[in-house]
Image: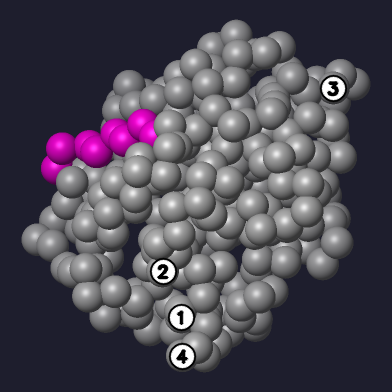
Amino acid sequence: MLRHGYLRSPIPWREIGVKGAHGLWIIPDESQKPDLVVYYCHGGGFSMGSSYFYLEFLLALVSLLTESGYRNPALFALEYTLVPDASFPTQLQQSMAGYDYVLSITGDASRVCVSGDSAGATLILSLLLHIADSPGHEKRRPGYAILISPWISIVSQNNRNTQSDYLNANSLELYGRQYAGSEANLRDPLVSPGTCKDREWWSKACPSAGLSFLYGSEEVLGPETRNLIALLRKSRCHVIAREEPGGIHAWPVATMFLSNTQAERQKGLRDVAKIVKQSIDV
């Protein structure tokens, strides 16, 4: 933020401890209850990344949500444990704890949008499947989900290198196997959501207002993303797919940090804010 002339954060944020984990809580007015909460999990192949690294991206999203018409939108960004310090199921358990914290704030799951990019989006998909397989799932499933370049299948022959994307399929498989912890876990949908072909399970896992996928046409993970979108649609889920022509992995995040103009930097985030407002209009 210093590069843009900010000596202090334009929106208040603080670190919050939750059961077995912690995260960043961002809200314009802490004295008022939020009318929307975005629950976000960052990417990084389960082995790198941090909510602190994403802070500018997250603050910009909250600002754009306010601009879109929300009175006091909040965001909770989970800091989950990275590989090799921990592997599955630690990260899923932490994502569940973070979601429970968000629900304790809103008191209404329909006012929650779960989101993440790359490995973080994988955790969100795993969380949705876990909620669907738990008692009282109807009251606990979120209002909406926005998935940015999700890592659908941890190990898959469909994850292939492209000329444009910066991801490497072989490195991804190495990171993925470290996260899974065992060969057997790679077949567990809570580890690798793409292994779930059960339409009924996905139907129960879908947020009440549906899901959106934002990804690039040049993604290493593109084929698995398209396969899941097709399966979700067959599972009676409302799905919006935004495939950016020529786009690389996690393009809304990458453009935020790498583009030169404000319009280019905010392109993906404005798409996200617009979709959230159209889907959760409180």
- Left or right position of 51 against 172: right
Res. 183 mark? 4
Q: Are marks 1 and 4 in contact (CB under 8 Å)?
A: yes
Residue interval drawn in magenta = 239-246
Q: Which residue is mark 2?
A: 195
Which residue ends up furthest to the front in the rendered image?
A: 200
Q: Give residue 168's position: percent from left, percent from top.
A: 25, 72
* In magenta stretch: residue 245: yes
Residue 5 visible, this orientation = no
Of pointers 2 and 1, the one earlier in the residue sequence: 1
Where's the C terminus, which quadrant? top right
* Magenta segment main secondary structure: strand
**Is 72 positioned to the left or the right of 263 in the image?**
right
Separation of marks 1 and 4 at Cα, in angstroms: 5 Å
Which residue has dot 1 on it?
A: 186
Q: CA distance from mark 2 to mark 1?
A: 8 Å
